Image (cartoon, helix red, strand yellow):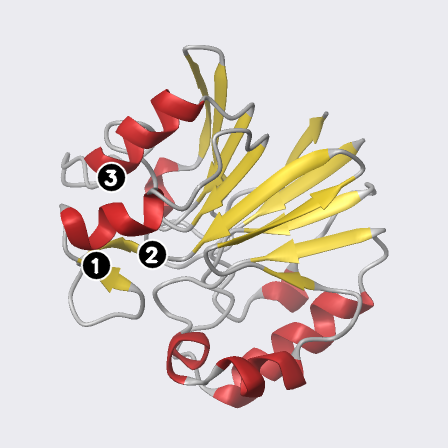
Amino acid sequence: MKIILISDTHNRHHDLELPDGDMIIHAGDVSSTGKEPEILDFLNWFKSLDYKYKIFIAGNHDFYFERANSEQISLIIPENLTYLNDSGVTIEGLKIWGSPVQPEFNNWAFNREIGDDIRQHWDLIPVDTDILITHGPPFRILDKTVRGHYVGCEDLLEKVMQIKPKLHIFGHVHEGYGTKEVNGIQFINASILNERYRYTNDPVEIEY
């Protein structure tokens, strides 16, 4: 299966040049302000893509998904898309789990305090997860800012090292774009925009 990975498009999705594949995964920040028109525009674009499977999570800019109730969200999600929010899906035997939360960062969506507040979300991740999608990165893995700070989540890193998914996909820290293998786990920061919100990075292609 060929999987295409993207994240942090921030309304620039129409500019993307996407390679062919079987599945596409978006790791959050589909919008800039999280208002409903931006979300609907993204969904209309995403549903039109020529992939058999299309999966996404929200990010800290995507306020609509935090403020709307589950019924409102279900009404706008097209049938051919899979939206994950502390939830999972199994596709062709692959167990995929997604969560939008990240450590507290200004006054954005899906903020959680480190410790018990955020750990309760990571505790939901099944131990047999094959592909983990979170908006934010784990600590010290593709999470270094231009100022030299590591801003990933230590609690998430602990959980990931415990369950050992084959792939962990995220974004959030634009300047952390890239791939890295640690302890047999492939980590991928798929941020499309750089730290200046310019479209500089290519979608990541992997063969699973």
Q: Residue at x 36, y 51 (%)?
A: 172
Q: 37 or 66: nearer the eye? A: 66
> Gap in Å between the C-alphas at discs 1 and 3?
13 Å
Quadrant (top left, top right, bottom left, bottom right) of the C terminus: top right
Q: Position of residue 74 (x, y in %)?
A: 62, 79
* Quarter occupied by residue 76: bottom right
Q: Residue at x 66, y 74 (%)?
A: 43
Residue 177 placement (x, y as % from top left): 43, 37
* Mark closest to the chain's N terminus, 1 or 2: 2
Rendered position, 135 above or below 150:
below
Helix, strand or loop at disc 3?
A: loop
Q: Secondary structure at mark 2?
A: loop
Q: Secondary structure at mark 1?
A: strand
The residue closer to the viewer here, 119 or 181, is 119
The residue under label 1 is 112
C-alpha distance separating marks 1 and 2: 7 Å
* Crowd tier of the residue under label 2, counting other residues whose Cα lies within 10 Å: few below 14, some 14–19, many 20 or above: many
Q: Look at mark 2 in the image and give the residue it sits on.
A: 101
